[in-house]
Image (cartoon, coloured by chain):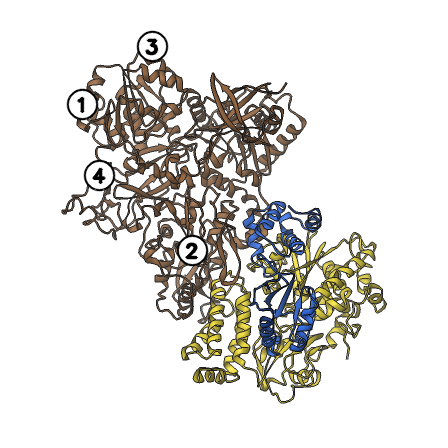
Amino acid sequence: MEKPLTEHIREDRRPLSLKEYEKVGGYEAVRKVMKGLSPKSIIDVVKESNLRGRGGAGFATGLKWSFVPQNNSKPKYLICNADEMEPGTFKDRILLESTPHQVIEGMILSAFAIQADQSFVFLRWAYKTAAKAIDEAIHEAYAAGYLGKNILGAGYDLDMHLHTGVGRYMCGEETALLNSLEGKRATPRAKPPFPQVSGLFGKPTIVNNVETLCNIPHIINKGSDWFRTLSLTPDTGTKIYGVSGKVKKPGAWELPLGVTLRELIEEHAGGMLDGLKFKGALPGGASTDFLVEEHLDVKMDYTSVAAAGSRLGTGTLIILDDKTCPVGFVQNLEYFFAQESCGFCTPCREGLPWVSKILSSIDEGVGREEDLKLLEFHTKYLGPGNTFCALAPGAMAPLQSAMKYFRKDFEQHIHEQKCPWN
Amino acid sequence: MLTIEEKNEIEKAISVMPVRKSACIEALKIVQHHRRWISDETLKEVAVYMEMSPEELDSVATFYNLLFRKPVGRHIILLCDSISCWIMGYDQIRNHLIEKLGIQYGGTTPDDRFTLLPNCCLGTCDTAPALMIDNDLYKNVTLEQLDEILNKYS
Amino acid sequence: MATLYIDDKPYEVKPGKNVLETCLALGFNLPYFCWHPSLGSIGACRQCAIKVFKNEEDKTGRIIMSCMEPVLDKQRISISDSEATAFRANVIESLMTNHPHDCAVCDEGGSCHLQDMTVMTGHAYRRYQYKKRTYQNQNLGPFINHEMNRCIQCYRCVRFYRDYAGGHDLEAFASKNHVYFGRHEDGTLENEFSGNLAEVCPTGVFTDKTLKTHYTRKWDLTMAPSVCHHCSLGCNIIAGERYGGLRAITSRYHGDVNGYFLCDRGRFGYEFTNAPDRVRQPLMGQQPADAEKIVQEVSQIITSSKVIGIGSPRASLESNFALKAFVGADNFYHGVSDDEHELALLVIKILKEGPARTPSMREVEKADAVFILGEDLTNTAPMMALAVRQSVRQEPIEQITQASIPAWHDAAAREFIQEKRGPLFIATVNTTKLDEIATETYRAAPDDLARLGYAIANLLDNSIPPVKNLSNDLQQLAQRMATALKRARRPVIISGMSSDCATVIKAAANVAWALHKNNTQAGIVLTLPECNSMGLAMMGGHRLHSAVNAVINGHADTVIIIENDLFRHNKNDQVEKFLERAKHVIVLDHTPHRTSQKASVLIPAGTFAESDGTLVNNEGRAQRFFQVHECPSPVQESWRWLLQIAREIKHEQMKDWKNFQDVSHAVSLAEPLLKGIDEIAPPPDFRIAGQKIPREPHRYSGRTAMLANIHVSEEKPPEDPDSPLSYTMEGFRGQAPSSMIPFFWSPGWNSVQSINKYQEEIGGSLRGGNPGLRLLEPNIHGVTKYFTDLPEIFIPMKDHIWMVSLHHIFGSEELSARGAAIAKRVPKSYVMINVQDAADLNITSGTVLEFEITRQVYRLPVEISTSIPKGVGGMPYGLPDLPFIDLPAWAILKNTSHG
């Protein structure tokens, strides 16, 4: 089983230096490209690889790149979205801390593909170790001629800067990230126009997730056919899956796309802690729908998880066990989303606090029958298309699925006027 | 007045941006790093330097939760309250901290030593519950370790 | 055209506009908050949701925000779809979770867009059971009241204030459901257009603080269409009255002039009409007299004296003309300083004889390059400055449409445009607020400004003589400006009279004309000092100086002055002498001043709110304003007093003039330049379905009770012999002709947003055409005669300062400065000098500088400027505590300590 993204990560996760990275084949892809590959050929191979964005939305990477106007206008921007902040998600941290040069190499290749001349790593503030690693790696890459003017003598220029954020979940949304990078409030932008056309400072911009970018050097080196063999399903490549919650061995592992939920929990995470039963899981972070026992054999790829009524999202599972209150679980999430609403559009700004307050009152034993109707109403009212961005619809995913699968638990709270788990 | 050091750092941040204003978040981070928090006075000084009005800058500053517009202690405890930590019993840690420090969320101990803040996901969910004090991340935090952890900060 | 299917019915509509404005223009009631015709779409409030269907077969459809969707041909949408309808009600429900429901004590109540939209969506029953969030309010200064708890976070306030009006001190703070709109701390909103927040805000967060001091609901106001009297632009206003006093001014939409907005001087300047010291009583030799006696006395004086009349740039055409007719054209003097009159005549000459057309403010908004020469627009013609602010977006907006982003898509447009701005060049003596958006600025003495203008003109057309001794830098600047102006498709040159400098205006004309040679779209805007400076100049009259001579030389012994404080228009010692020499000084005015204090007969005149009249704005557009309420007896309109006296003395020309229309018609007949002004509004006998147009909304309340403390029986409502407007709520319910809309209202639309229903297309012309008549059109067939009187380089003079006027939006205009709120914003007098001069004189900021101008000594605290040119100084124009000074002039410095 190949683990191209993580195979060289050390046990203690200390970052690979430039030399160490080069020794294991690092920057080969950049050398290959600078020897004479065209930007278009890179876009083509990435398109053929069928790589889909690993940040959560799963949009085809090559296709996204192809929307950037192919002209010589400057500047163009390539942004690495390293603002990992989806609750329950901790996969990019590993790549950032341990293989910073892999991130940078992916960025150089992607930037070349869209002929960007400026690039930023938008890094989450909390990732202090990663910040140090990336910062040092950028310096090393400049010193080695992988960044800066006339990269490897090929006449291509690229600058790279590290920007660390100052909080706010919204910054993970690519257009809000752009606003934040411009020194503005991180509210989302209208799409269209898409950032590929009018992005950072109104210029063509691509925003890619860390894990997505890390795949690029390997696709360039080994080709799209190889990449397509990595997975167990038509969705290609490997995925860094993670499991948190009350399992024996929480953690993250690079695995072929398409391993089952059961395999992840039972084999890789070591199964549930003793005395606990699996009740459900959010498959890809806080803004995905619950999967439950009947879904344990669902393949964890974009298509299959969607077919099961959820989203692969970030591929990092949050496990709900039978001794944890599902209402409290959802309340924690909805409170989070209410706090992280940017306050721009009405349904999200006003609806999420309402939802959170209803869930609190149910959890505190003062819920009313009509509260369930109000919750159901909000799951539709805050649904896709009704709000300006995907935050509120994402927030409704765990709620609507919890109400579907754990409705009895909600009702019990209301009937007993207390939380049965307390 | 902004110090020379602060100005130099801010200038560096401005130099990578096509528009001066767009380095304003960096500028706020820099002064916060030096002054712990951003007072109204500080905000105005930075605004002048960034060629923005205080309103324009404060509009940005008040949007982000890690730019502190109220005084904070010498050390900032950011306790993750997101879902994985919640599952793993973060509330005990919270209760212990509140009791031990004698402050609520948002509060600062009378000796100015700690400010306690809730924080969403720290991105280390496989080692929940987690908290950060200043730049230090603590994973798999147990009640027993807490006092020892706090003792590291004076 | 495109076919848009709305609920399965086809409509022929313009493609490219957004669906919301298209639906509104078609008359549909579709609720919205964050969208505004002038601000565009951002998609924040989600209120205008509708359904869109893929095709005829698609019955499910999906919810979209109509403001964010361009109209496409054969598009199928539904407004009435049950899911869309429910969604819109749910958005209101969301907004209401935190709204305080304090309509009963809210100033917005009854004219509240949020109320209207709430009713429109049908949301009524409250399901939210939890506590509301609350905010602290701020003191935002004398104009605007702040009540944040009412906020529905539509973001319109900051979008208007910051994005549209260029303000920097109002922002959105915090996030989630704690977003706060205000300043970073308590303090006066500094932007000159802050009053529009009261109309832009869809609810009662920002309200008119002056209205609060004498609060009246919109439905209880008696309103009339009026025209702002506080600068030369002629913005259209609605003035509202109750209990004999003006209560509020709101914008009266005009598609060519002021659009949706007003400046703060225009909105809050009305308070002078309610001033306690207003002239309300006829006085003879300082003794009260009744009206009849006054008429008789004045008639006697007139018949036995040699009378001259002095008009006013702030009085209507009708009042000025009534005086002119009364005293005879030979004895009519225009009442402004001779310099001012000369400049006004120059302005008319340029607009009439030159080839370049003067654009409306709406056209200035659409200009793709602007050159401002010598004018601090924000302070002299504020709304023109607002138009210029929009113009710098034109060039980038043309780029975004090329990138397939519709211009109304404000969110996307601003991200795309970022800091890009089209060409705007400003050459003025001192800094101006517009500098921040200018491509380049140039600071120089007026003569040097003119030289720059001439140099640009020469580069555009080499038949204009070159400017000699121009520095290299200046030559290059001129070249850059010429290139940008030449490249533009709709360039506009703006200048005006506040520079007090004919060569500056001439230079501007040369530039515009030179551009016009190759681009007939090139326009010229010239601003004038007062609301009817243009009209007065078009009417003619002799110089004020010769009036003084006439009295001093004994050719006249009696002077009638209407609505004019001569001390503001001439050297004060001369005015003193003049008024002392005259045997009889008869003053008609509503506002007391130094001239009225010298009157032997003081006759109380109606303010603009108590009069009908016509003004001609800087564009040469004649516009009618209507009486809002009857003059409180014994006050009468100036022209009506004159008509009365004329009847008394059986004045040959005037004896049969009875009402306003007679005067207006006489103006049109007698004054070639003013032909047609009597037809810009329907005549007094105009009726719709046999009915008059009511000044009061049909919900007007308390009519029978409001004066019950005086008399229990209801008084007969006054008649209006001068217009088809009635003083009551009775009359035609539908829309009045565009020239006489007393208030905007439509069923379900009580707020100012009902304007949508009055427009041919959203943001376009009023139905039936925008009112007013343009009187000055250029001479496109003649040979352009460029000006050639090129000034020499300005050379500073030792121990002297070349003193120019500096204008202030609050303070420089006589009437508005008398209002309580605006008075709080009037600066203290000062003298501004260059930093180098200050250093040479060894004086610091605040030091009192003593200097002499034409034998008059002034002592004023110094303001030091890094931008005003060396050797040039500035004094505030027209402040209440400063006398008239004939500027520009050399000021001789006293007691200078330097060697």
Badge 4 local density, few (<14 within 10 Å), some, or many (20+)?
Answer: some
Work out whether mark 2 precedes mark 4 in sequence or the reverse, and give the earlier one.
2
Contact between marks 1 and 3 (CB within 8 A): the answer is: no
Letter of the chain that mark 4 sits on in the rendering: C
Q: Colour of chain C?
A: brown
Eye-nearest disc, 2 or 1: 1
Residue A115 lies in what quarter of the image?
A: bottom right
Give the chain letter for blue.
B
Q: Name the mark nearer the viewer: 1 or 4.
A: 1
Q: Which residue is mark 1?
A: C296
Marks 1/4: CA–CA distance: 25 Å
Which residue is tagged 4?
Answer: C720
Few, some or many residues within 10 Å of mark 3 (<14, 14–19, 20+) = few
- Residue C830 located left or right of residue B26: left
Q: Residue at x 57, y 82 (%)?
A: A324
Q: Which residue matches tag 2? A: C22
Q: Are marks 2 and 1 in contact (CB under 8 Å)?
A: no
